[in-house]
Image (cartoon, helix red, strand yellow):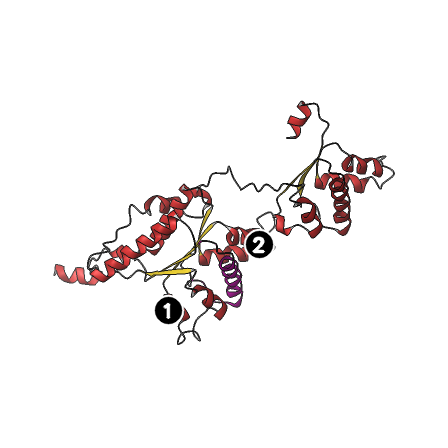
Amino acid sequence: MGNALVEAGQPVRFVSVPDLLDHLRSAFDPAIGAQYDDIFLQAIEAPVLILDDLGAQSATAWADEKLDQILTHRYNRRLPTLVTTGTRFEELGDRLRTRLGDPYFSTVANIKAGSGTSDIRDSGLEYRLAESMTFDTFTTKGATGASIAQKRSLSEAFAAAKVFAEHPSGWLYLAGPTGVGKTHLAAAIVGESIAKGQNTLFRFVPDLLDDLRRSYGSVGGKSFDHTFRLVRDIDVLVLDDFGAEASTAWAEEKLYQLIVHRHDSMMPTVFTSRTALETVGGSDSRSASPYSDAIISRLSDANVVAERYLSAPDFRHRGAAPRPSTTDRKSSRK
């Protein structure tokens, strides 16, 4: 935009916010020769001002005051101003939000990360799983020996997952023992959602909590706030193996924050778990549950959560009989 204005003969002042504040600080030193008033006027009176990377500056009362003066001056005089920031709009200060969010004067454009096209590589789902675990490769017949009722449970879970993938809304809770296809359906939802352009994240719950722990005090890496917000605010979230995490007060708190936010905001979420909701939230089991009443209440909200219980033999065994032990094989040769 700045280059286009210059080519059109329009004078433009382009400066990153951290650099502008550094220039203003240095102007207080007489040895440098720069005049504070000159630098400040270049910012507040520029015919067009582009402030790049707002929020990247060191947060001090002085820096906040200078930025407030600049933006308030330009806002009151309706001077053309472009601001870029990596900070979410709602996390800006009240006075900045008032000026930058004025619906009669300002426009806020949210640019999503990446090229604008969702990519399976950014979803947290391994490419191998994304290729092999699709709706086309899921079988509702189950492993050898599956009963009619068990096959029906697979068909109902498959249908619910397809509906969710086509029109993500509410929460889908896929429960059942190991090997029945819960993660397969969850991965299929991820692939379908990404194909439809939805920003989607797949996280194995124990790994998610480990990543959050590691992000505390991260140097050079992504901060805890960045990591947590990414999961909390993603369009479609898949939490795989919910309940497999180590039960600690800290883990409970983080999951509570995540679940409450997505429940209150009605954000599409998929859970896979080896524990049925009846077991998690039943009155007889609450005393033994690793989750607080606040989490259980939201998971049990029938207006938001649809549960499907997959009941079938472990498909990884394909219904085969257990392999004989080494001792058995040696005995058979005698």
- Quadrant of the image for the N terminus? top right
Q: Which amino acid does the dot numbered 1 rest on?
A: Glu
Residue shown at 41% from the left, 46% from the top? 193
Q: Is residue 306 left or right of residue 105?
A: left
Read off the magenta span: 244-268
Q: Is residue 224 above or below residue 39?
A: below
Which residue type carries mark 2?
Phe
When the figure is inspected, residue 259 is found, relative to residue 168, above or below; the finding is below
- The residue tagged with tag 1: helix, strand or loop? helix
Q: Main secondary structure of the magenta part?
A: helix
> Quadrant location of the C terminus?
bottom left
Q: Which residue is mark 2?
A: 224
Measured in 3D between alpha carbons, the distance from the residue under mark 2 to the one under mark 1, in whole angstroms, is 33 Å
- Give the x, y percent position of residue 102: 67, 45
Which secondary structure lies at badge 2? helix
- Front-lying residue, 273 or 107: 107
- Are the two marked residues, 2 and 1, in contact with CB atoms closer than 8 angstroms? no
Query: On the picture, is 261 further left or further right than 95?
Result: left
Mark 1 Cα-neighbour bin, 10 Å: few <14, some 14–19, many ≥20: few
Q: Earlier in the sequence, mark 2 or mark 1?
A: 2
Q: Residue furthest left?
A: 334
Q: Please tell me which residue is depicted at 62% across the width and 47% down the height of the picture.
A: 87
